[in-house]
Structure formats: structure tokens, C-alpha cells
Image: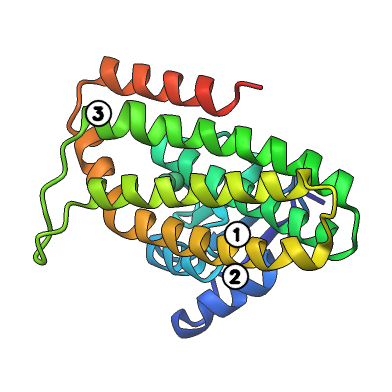
Amino acid sequence: MDEEICDLTKTAASHLQTAAFYEIKDMPRGTAMHLLFADDPAIVLHSLNLQLRNNLRWEVSRTAAGHWLAVIHRAEDVPPVDVLDALKRDHKRLDAMFSQIIHLTDRNHLCDAQALMRAFSAALERHLAVEHDILAKAIRTPSNATGLDPTAAMISEHKEILAQSAMIAASYEEDDATANSISPLLAILAGYLSKHEQREELSLFPIWTGAIRHAPEAARTDLFARTMAILNAD
Ligand SMILES: [Fe+2]
Ligand SMILES: [Fe+2]
């Protein structure tokens, strides 16, 4: 079934994105969807990817009949392509871990939540190590129109995130710890973390992407290898 091709060559251009969306939206993990287009689908696929929160990866080739065949995968089924792709995925991983901590705490499974909070703190430290010790040190960022340096803003937000995480970790240690005492702290950090990640992806990551694109290939390869080694270290 994975090899079945969905033919969209007769679909009107105005309906292509919607048609592709309905083909792809429930695509199971580990599978690929083959879509056939009459014209170059680059714009349709990029719009669709925005709609699906950057969860797609694809390759496009020309068929003998002159059509365009797109083989589409879920992003998590293919390895990260570069440092920024790896960091964005790590944001999602951290968010998912933190949601699970909230879920466990709300259900009063405090021991499990505490164990996951330890794993989250370790994963967070690795993520910040890439952003601080590698990227922020290697790439200078100019101040924006309001005079704010996005790297300085990132570092100050990281301090706040680490302080809040430490406070939450300490809350689980207390003898009288309850879901009611910890949940409000989790809610505050969840909101702060989400805004921080959005700000980073909108302001800093494009600057880093541009700088890395202009680096020599050997430096890019080395940077990617060091990033993956840190993010995947357990
Ligand atoms: Fe960050
Ligand atoms: Fe980040």
C-alpha cells in the first residue's frame, strides 16, 4: 500500500493543497505517501508543511511522462538534516516530555513525574549546551531595530528556564509535595518555555541558519556532528 500513488494531476491548482492535506493528514508513522502532480509542487508542499507545523519531509522527481512525483514522509521518520532542524525537533521532544510531566503530576503520580523531570532537566541542559557553548560562541548576532541582541535575550531566558526548572525539581523533593503545590509552577514554565522556543525559532534560528549556510562544508559537517553527539548523549 505504501507504494500506491495518489494521482493529483487532474486536480485544479486551487484545490491541490486541500487534496494533498486529506491524503497526508493521517499518514501513519514509518510510511511514505506518493503524490503525483502535473506541475512543480514546491509551493503547494511548502504551504502544506506550514499547515502541518513543519511535520513533513519530501523528495520530488520527474516521471517519464513529465509529471512531478513527491514522496512524502513524516519528519520524525527521517534523520535531521542540519543543526537547526535537530534543535527544532529537540524543542518538540522537550515540550512532549514536559507535557507528560504535567500529565503525571495532575494525576498525582509524583514519583514518575519526578523521574521524568530529572530526565527533562538533563535533556534541557544538553539542548542549552548546543545553543550556548557551540552556536552562541561561534556566531555573533547583531542587535535588532530596538537595540536588543537576540543572543543576549536567549541567554537571559535560559537562566530563567533553568531557575524555574530547579525550583520544580526541588518541589518534588519536599516531604509535603502535592500536585496542587507543583502544578502551578509547571504551568508557568510550560508557558515560558513555549514562548522562548517560538522567539528563538523566529529571531535567532534564521540568523544561525544564514551563518551556517555560509560556513565551509567541513565546518558545517563538524558542527552537525557535535550537535547530534550532545543532543543524543544519555
Ligand atoms: Fe533556548
Ligand atoms: Fe532552543
Q: Do the residues labelled 1 and 2 touch (CB within 8 Å)?
A: yes
128 w.r.t. 71: above or below: above
* Sequence-earlier tag: 1 or 3: 1
Q: What element carries label 3?
A: helix
Residue beneath disc 3 = 137
The picture places residue 219, in percent across and down from the top left corner, at 27, 18
Residue beneath disc 1 = 35
10 left or right of 5 in image: left
* Mark 2 closeness class: few <14, some 14–19, many ≥20 residues within 10 Å: some
Badge nearest the viewer, 1 or 3? 3
C-alpha distance separating marks 2 and 3: 42 Å
The picture places residue 171, in percent across and down from the top left corner, at 71, 50
Q: What element carries label 1?
A: strand
Q: Which quarter of the figure has residue 221? A: top left
188 left or right of 155 in image: right
Q: Which amino acid does label 3 sit on?
A: Lys
Q: What residue type is labelled 2?
A: Ala
